Image (cartoon, grey):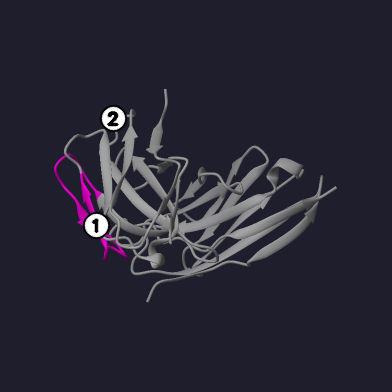
Amino acid sequence: GQNIDQPTEMTATEGAIVQINCTYQTSGFNGLFWYQQHAGEAPTFLSYNVLDGLEEKGRFSSFLSRSKGYSYLLLKELQMKDSASYLCAPLDSNYQLIWGAGTKLIIKP
Amino acid sequence: NAGVTQTPKFRVLKTGQSMTLLCAQDMNHEYMYWYRQDPGMGLRLIHYSVGEGTTAKGEVPDGYNVSRLKKQNFLLGLESAAPSQTSVYFCASSYEGSHQPQHFGDGTRLSIL
């Protein structure tokens, strides 16, 4: 079967760094997306990884290891506005996104 | 540039009633999707379309129907609403179906009593 595993909730301090992990098992693999979703709002695109390694985009970076079925999202210099849910979503062999339940990130001052 | 627009934003239905959710995108995207999002669960794909005039079933299609008569519009219908269909419904679109990110509407909050 297909499965996505992310922590349900994490807490971090403003200005700090946090790493949100995602492990996945899918039927085939065609890349992995990370989305951000603020409470009561729509998901918005953060990053896409298809090759192994780290992709950096400002304060956010995303890492992929295809052999381990593992990805993480790294958020630096945390701001209060980063309080949101972060959704991990790999693309399976049919190019369908398989969505994790998301990690709720709480930022404390 | 409105992006993806969903109507209505909120709706309360009684069990057995029918309704249609409308999704419109102005980005000339080929692919469109309907998801539902329930607490503690990931987004689940209901139906999707890879182009005008085409539709396909997703993970949870039962109780829903869709139509894509025009490229910019994707309609989701509930023929006979059930309390289990209480959810937040998101429409999304993408240029094509591989590495292009999906763009989401603001969602429709639907309650079935």
Residue B74 locus on image (x, y percent): 26, 42
Which type of secondary structure does the marked residue at label 2 adopt?
A: loop
Tell us which disc is closer to us: 1 or 2: 1
Q: Quickly name the residue at label 1.
A: B79
Secondary structure, magenta segment, majority class: loop
Residue B56 within the magenta-colored segment of the rendering: yes
Residue drawn at (47%, 64%) of the image: A66
| Image coords of residue B10 (percent x, y) | 46, 45
Please tell me which residue is depicted at 43% across the width and 42% down the height of the picture: B104
Q: Amino acid at mark 2?
A: Asn
Residue A91 percent location from the top left of the image: 38, 57
B8 vs B51, left or right, is right
Instruction: Decide: is A101 above or below A85.
Output: below
Magenta region, residue range: B49-67
Q: Earlier in the sequence, mark 1 or mark 2?
A: 2
User: Which of these two is toward me, A61 or B60?
Assistant: B60
**Mark 2 lies on residue:** B28
A74 left or right of A63?
Answer: right
